[in-house]
């Protein structure tokens, strides 16, 4: 074994002579590796958010095995390691509270270990952006493999979409169209294989964003979690990362401003989740890419929604996959001049070249641009006004067209719990054209900016046949949710945003075509109310929750921590022995 002319990062560990090199190599050999793995080949970390507590990621250990095959095939040395999994369904108060912690773990573990490149395994909503954020801040060659969606839910012969049908079944139960026994049966029919939500919720959206950004292999976002081709693409990613190390192809060369513009347009075309706005904003911050909230509105405006998936449309991820997946969408956008085809990707080629040969096999699922599901300009809109000086967003495709221009009486709740405690009350003083305001659900207020904004329509109105109302909140909405819901109101109420000053009885006007959100109260009156406003006590005085409240940025900056913005590189840390 010679230790001369070392260029690879891992050689600072495995190429070292004397005592410390012996320590680095010897202990690893307890797993049965021979001396040949230390011959200077690229050492590839497989950062896995596998966890049985994150059901969407529970199969990632099997995906990791396929990645390892690919790494060995290409002459690399794979080592799998865990990064915390943030499972959307089980974690309280919200998985979003932990996205930044996940990103810190990914970043620190990649940097602290003898790695030359990394494959990122993710699935559930926050795991994909968190892993990308961490990898961006280290900036070692990285490729992402998302775990893939579940098979389509099937209940009584009908497609059932994860998340989306939870809200529908809840409404059916409350309105007496379903009973509890039927709901128990339905829940088993919704999640019927490994994988993440198979609606165009946040997980599917972020998988598509990773692909549109150029960080995962073409077609990778849509293969179902249990499809053999999911494992084939994972193997290919394993081979590819070894080559990427040789090419020194880093996230900073891939996730450029052009890549973000492509991702934002792709998000409009797929009818993706509003959460992508928060996550892409945070990710851009890690890379030093200038991106503000208005970019999301302006870049998306010329793009119609062409993917007909729940919650906005009819189909599910399996259908999208069989129709050709995201490459079809990217090719269609490129042909319409709506994609920067030269943006670099993990293949080493531009995104345009990756998708040039993509074919669509089902134009009901991926519509032609000329016959879209939603016309251009009707996607997710960014609103401003005296109620949201820092911006707010609304997903028009998930809203009721008749409510997009609406003035109503505010009915205000300081917390989501305050609303839930009365929403079944038959005597609740509320009418269909009122505007439900929920505050205290922002990044620092809750804390963690949970997906609570699409509170159900009050039961008495549901029973009277009302299906939608305007709701306004400083929190988020599940990507699988729907309704005329104004989200991410910034600044949030807990830091003194105007949302904190609204009172029941105020008139609130939502005007989506004009991109405005206003409370019909004079500036003087708002000033008077501000003078007597008392900031609520923070929810935590110590621990991680305290750290979070101290350092979380507002939604328009992606709710990242202020001290994590930017990249810190992959320099080899000092000796440990
Ligand atoms: Fe994990 Fe929806 S709960 S992706
Ligand atoms: Mg979600």
Image (spheres, rainbow, N blue to C red):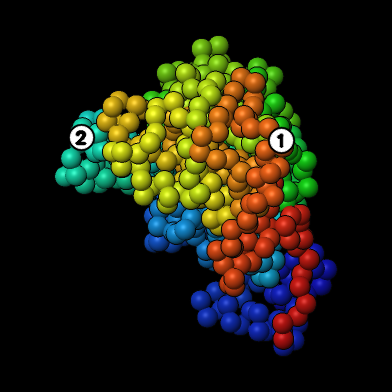
Task: State the image coordinates of residue 167 (x, y, percent, origin top left).
Answer: 35, 38
- For label 2, the crowd category at 10 Å Cα-Cα, with few meaning under 14, some 14 to 19 and many 20 or more, is few
How many marks can you see?
Answer: 2
Left or right: where 316 falls relative to 218: left
Q: Which residue is mark 2?
A: 176
Q: Which residue is mark 1?
A: 523
Q: Residue at x 68, y 70 (%)?
A: 112
Q: Which of the two marks, 1 or 2, is nearer to us in this view?
A: 1
Q: Secondary structure at mark 2?
A: loop
259 or 543, nearer to the observer: 543
Task: State the image coordinates of residue 246 (x, y, percent, origin top left).
Answer: 73, 53
Q: Secondary structure at mark 1?
A: helix
Q: Is residue 208 visible?
A: no
| Ligand 2 is within 8 Å of the C-beta of the residue at disc 1 | no
Sequence-wise first label, 1 or 2 = 2
Q: Residue at x 41, y 46 (%)?
A: 419
Left or right: where 232 falls relative to 462: right
* C-alpha span from label 1 to label 2: 45 Å
Task: State the image coordinates of residue 91 (x, y, percent, origin top left).
Answer: 44, 59
**Residue 229 sits above or below residue 482 on the image:** below
| Residue found at the very far right of the displayed protein | 5
161 or 541, nearer to the observer: 541
480 or 92, nearer to the observer: 92
Q: Residue at x 16, y 45 (%)?
A: 181
The quadrant holding residue 269 is top right
- For label 1, the crowd category at 10 Å Cα-Cα, with few meaning under 14, some 14 to 19 and many 20 or more, is few
């Amino acid at each position: 074994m010679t230790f001369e002319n070392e260029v690879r990062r891992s050689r600072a560990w495995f190429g070292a002579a004397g005592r410390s090199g012996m320590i680095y190599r010897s202990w690893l050999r307890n797993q049965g590796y021979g001396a040949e793995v230390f011959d200077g080949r690229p050492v590839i970390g497989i950062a896995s958010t596998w966890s049985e507590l994150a059901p969407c990621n529970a199969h990632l250990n099997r995906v990791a095995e396929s990645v390892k095959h690919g790494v060995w095939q290409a002459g690399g040395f794979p080592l799998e390691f865990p990064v915390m999994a943030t499972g959307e369904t089980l974690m309280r108060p919200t998985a979003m509270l932990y996205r930044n912690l996940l990103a810190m773990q990914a970043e620190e573990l990649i940097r602290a270990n003898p790695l030359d490149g990394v494959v990122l395994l993710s699935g559930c909503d926050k795991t994909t952006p968190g892993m990308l954020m961490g990898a961006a801040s280290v900036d070692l060659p990285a490729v992402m493999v998302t775990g893939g969606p579940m098979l389509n839910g099937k209940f009584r012969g009908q497609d059932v979409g994860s998340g989306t049908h939870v809200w529908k079944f809840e409404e059916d139960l409350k309105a007496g169209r379903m009973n509890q026994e039927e709901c128990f049966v339905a829940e088993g029919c919704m999640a019927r294989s490994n994988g993440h939500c198979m609606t165009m919720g946040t997980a599917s959206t972020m998988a598509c964003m990773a692909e549109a950004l150029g960080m995962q292999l073409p077609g990778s976002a849509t293969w179902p979690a249990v499809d053999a081709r999911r494992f084939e693409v994972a193997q290919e990613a394993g081979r590819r990362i070894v080559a990427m190390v040789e090419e020194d192809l880093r996230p900073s060369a891939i996730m450029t401003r052009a890549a973000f513009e492509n991702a934002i347009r792709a998000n409009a075309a797929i009818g993706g989740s509003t959460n992508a706005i928060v996550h892409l904003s945070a990710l851009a911050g890690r890379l030093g890419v200038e991106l503000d909230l208005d970019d999301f509105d302006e870049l998306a405006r010329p793009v119609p929604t062409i993917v007909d998936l729940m919650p906005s449309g009819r189909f599910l991820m399996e259908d999208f996959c069989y129709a050709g997946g995201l490459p079809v969408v990217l090719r269609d956008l490129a042909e319409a001049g709506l994609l920067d085809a030269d943006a670099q990707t993990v293949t080493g080629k531009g995104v345009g070249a990756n998708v040039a040969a993509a074919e669509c096999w089902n134009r009901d699922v991926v519509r032609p641009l000329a016959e879209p599901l939603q016309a251009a300009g009707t996607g997710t809109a960014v609103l401003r006004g005296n109620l949201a000086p820092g911006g707010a967003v609304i997903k028009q495709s998930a809203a009721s067209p008749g409510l997009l221009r609406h003035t109503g009486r505010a009915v205000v709740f300081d917390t989501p719990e305050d609303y839930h405690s009365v929403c079944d009350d038959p005597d609740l003083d509320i009418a269909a054209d009122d505007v439900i305001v929920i505050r205290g659900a922002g990044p620092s207020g809750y804390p963690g900016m949970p997906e609570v904004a699409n509170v159900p329509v009050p039961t008495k109105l549901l029973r009277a046949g009302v299906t939608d109302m305007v709701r306004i909140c400083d929190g988020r909405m599940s990507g699988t949710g729907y309704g005329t819901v104004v989200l991410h109101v910034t600044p949030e109420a807990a830091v003194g945003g105007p949302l904190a000053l609204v009172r029941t009885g105020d008139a609130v006007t939502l005007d989506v075509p004009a991109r405005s959100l206003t409370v019909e109260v004079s500036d003087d009156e708002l000033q008077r109310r501000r003078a007597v406003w008392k900031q609520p006590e923070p929810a935590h005085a110590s621990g991680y929750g305290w750290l979070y409240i101290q350092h979380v940025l507002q939604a328009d900056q992606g709710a990242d921590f202020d001290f994590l913005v930017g990249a810190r590189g992959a320099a080899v840390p000092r000796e440990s022995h």
